[in-house]
Structures are given as C-alpha cells and as structure tokens.
Amino acid sequence: MTNAEQVMATESKYYLPVFARYPIVLERGEGPYVWDIEGKKYLDFLAGIAVNILGHAHPRLVAAIAGQAGKLIHVSNLYYTAEQTKLAKTLVELTGLDRAFICNSGAEANEGAIKLARKYGKTLAADKVEIITAEHSFHGRTLATLTATGQPKYRQGYEPLPGGFSYVPFGDLAALEKAVSAKTCAVMLEPIQGEGGVNIPDPSYLEGARELCDKYGALLILDEIQSGMGRTGKLLAWQQIGVKPDIMTLAKGLGGGVPIGAILATDEAAKAFHAGDHGTTFGGNPLACAAANATLAVLVEEDLPANAAKMGKYMVDALNGLKGKYPALIAEVRGQGLIIGMRMTKPGKDMVNACMAAGALINCTAGDVLRFVPPLNIGTNHVDEMIAILDKVFAAEQ
Ligand SMILES: Cc1ncc(COP(=O)(O)O)c(C=O)c1O
C-alpha cells in the first residue's frame, strides 16, 4: 500500500462516512499550489472552497498564527482579549454595520443570525417569526441552517425540522413580494448563490428585497459567507449595489483558512439580544481572531478585492474563449470577480477528476457547473495555467 492508500483506508475505517472525497491526500501548500503526499503538485482554484483567500502558507498569516499561539490560544468569552476587540472594530468599520459577534463557522454565523432575527421579530409582534429564504440557497448544516437552505436534499431525513421557514425562487421579486407579510421577521439571501451554481441575480432583486423588508418591518439578512471577503471585487457583494443588510454573516475567507465566522448587525437589530441570549466557548478566541486580523490587514493593504475584479474579468474572458472553442460542451460562463461558474452541457464530475489528474483542483456544483474560487492574490500566469489545463481536459472530453 502506498502512503496515500494507507491514509484513505484508515479514513474509511474510522471517519463518519459523510464525505465523498477525491482520492488524493494533501500535505502542504504554497501560494495557489498544493502538493499531495506523493509529491504531485496541483494548482488550487478551489482554495478550500473559497477559504484560502491569501493562498497557502502566506508568511504574514503564518507569522500571526505562530506568534499568537505562543502567547495565548484560548481564554473563553468570560474575559476580554485585544485581538477579538480589534477584529470586531475592523469588521464594523469595513462593513458599516454597528456590531459584531465572532463564532467558528458559516453555519454557526447563520444560526446566530436566525436566532437574532427571531428575537427581533418578537420584540415587534409575538407571531413575527417567519423567515423567507431562496430556492437553491445554501446556508449550512445545522438543523436551523439546513432548514433555511432551499434545497430539499439537505433536509431529507432530519425531520422534524424547525418551523417558520419558507422558500421562494431566487431572483424573482414578484414571488418574494407575494410571500412576505407582517409575520415575516427576516428575508435571508445570498447576494450570489455559491453552492447553488454561482447564480447572480439582477441588482434590482436585492434592491427590491430591501424595499420589501423595510415595508414589512422585516430584517434583510445577507449571507456573505461565500461571496464576501473581497471575492466579488468589493469586500462584500452587497457593496457592489449598495443594498445594506440589517444582519450579515461572514466565514470562509475571514480567517484565511483558520475556522472562524462572524455576525454583523445594525444597532436596531442587535438590541434584541441581551446578556445570555447567545454565546460560544471557542468563538472569537485570540488565535482565530489574530488570523482574521492578519488576513484582513493583507486584504486591505494589497487591495485584494481590486485584484479579484481584475483577475475575474481576465478569467471570464478566457473561459468565454474556451466556450467559443467548445460550444457543444460549455453552455454559459458567469461570474463576478473570482467567484466563477461555468455551466456545462453535461455533468461536470468527470471533468473535475480530469483536471485533478492534469494538476488542478476545482469542483462541480449543482451537477453541471464547474466552479472556480481561487485565492484572491493570483496573477494572470495562474489563470493562464488553469485555462491551459481546461483546454486539454475539454479537448479530450468533447
Ligand atoms: C453561502 C454559505 N453559507 C453558509 C455556508 C456554511 O458554512 P460552513 O461550512 O462554514 O458551516 C456555506 C458553505 O459552503 C456557504 O457557501
């Protein structure tokens, strides 16, 4: 047995069998590249599913984590730490919202956002508890967030589910208008659906959702877990169109790979929470916050959102070039900054595997959409390398 086979055999014996993993064992990374345990190099255009925004082993992130680990890793939220306070202040200043809460993951951030919306609704009316989300959305794997997720496959088998959730077609303002009522405490949307297939609504959709929330006294929750942290070309996708939410959530890229999530809220929404209403043991610990502070510092100083916009345009143009070359294989290219989807005319799984064999990591979402969410500090040379691999894979596939 090779080392890789040994790791995979051990996993299949001891790990809960919930993941359908690709058959490689990753060992180290540098910039936009990772190496497997057998020494094979891959261009990483999946970046831990839109997480490693600085690439792998970024020296400033490594130094921040190592420095903080040698000082203080964890103390609980019974005490103050300067790293957590600094992160909350930075997030508030960068987003224009008023208050932050730090947790450990995207699902946890959304779970907290849902709890805050419920509490807020009840300050207005006992039955103002309903939450509307979009079909094809993805909000996480906890019971409340998988219920918020507008894809039945994630809910099946977990009934009874928390009540009070309903779903509307994404991008359809008339459907949202029909669904919203005085009982709605929140409308929860991804500005761009990531797991749902990189679905980008018309800007008027979020504007209309904002207006409907204002009209009915409901909160607009924007899940920026995949679309945020500079990926679309601005720090947050909603900043592209100026539709400000009442609550927003972050995770994925926030810690550059260290697990962390955040809830941001306006003062108006935040006043529904009082001491004891929500909490976490690990959330906001100094190690994770130091990683997020370093990641945000690099993102701002190097203007990574601007690079994402530039590289995104370069890549979409190149992908459209491939679309011209392989019209029977490629149906559509859609993207904003460095969240890019390429809808194929057949399931994408085999092409993902072929890319991996050719030395590039991507994935397929919604069955037929190849998804590219690389680190935000890539250059045109990395895009060219990805396009050359795709060209080879498509030539063999058509
Ligand atoms: C938009 C969105 N929300 C929430 C989540 C859940 O985040 P996590 O896996 O960190 O719980 C994801 C993960 O893919 C996501 O893309």
Image (cartoon, grey):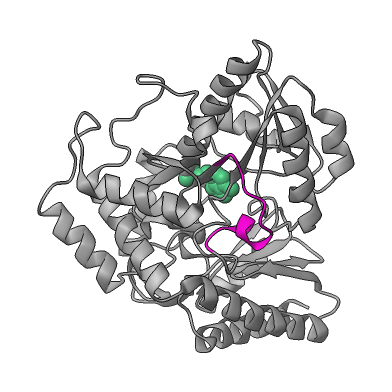
- Judging depth in this view, the residue of 233 and 367 nearest the camera is 233
| Whether residue 29 is visible | yes
Vertical placement of residue 383 versus 10, above or below: below
Work out whether 276 lies above or below 44. Answer: above
Q: Quadrant of the C terminus?
A: bottom right
Where in the figure is residue 65, as x and y percent of width and height? Answer: 22, 58
Q: Where's residue 78, x and y in %? A: 21, 28
Is 334 one of the magenta-colored residues? Answer: no
User: Which quadrant of the figure contains the N terminus?
Assistant: bottom left
120, 366: nearer the viewer: 120
Horizontal side of 368 relative to 313 (left or right) equals: right
Identity of the residue drawn at 62% across and 83% down: 387
Q: In the rendered view, does 249 fall on the left or right side of 8?
A: right
As for residue 245 lying within the magenta part, the answer is yes
Residue sitting at x 59%, y 83%: 389
| Dominant secondary structure, magenta | loop
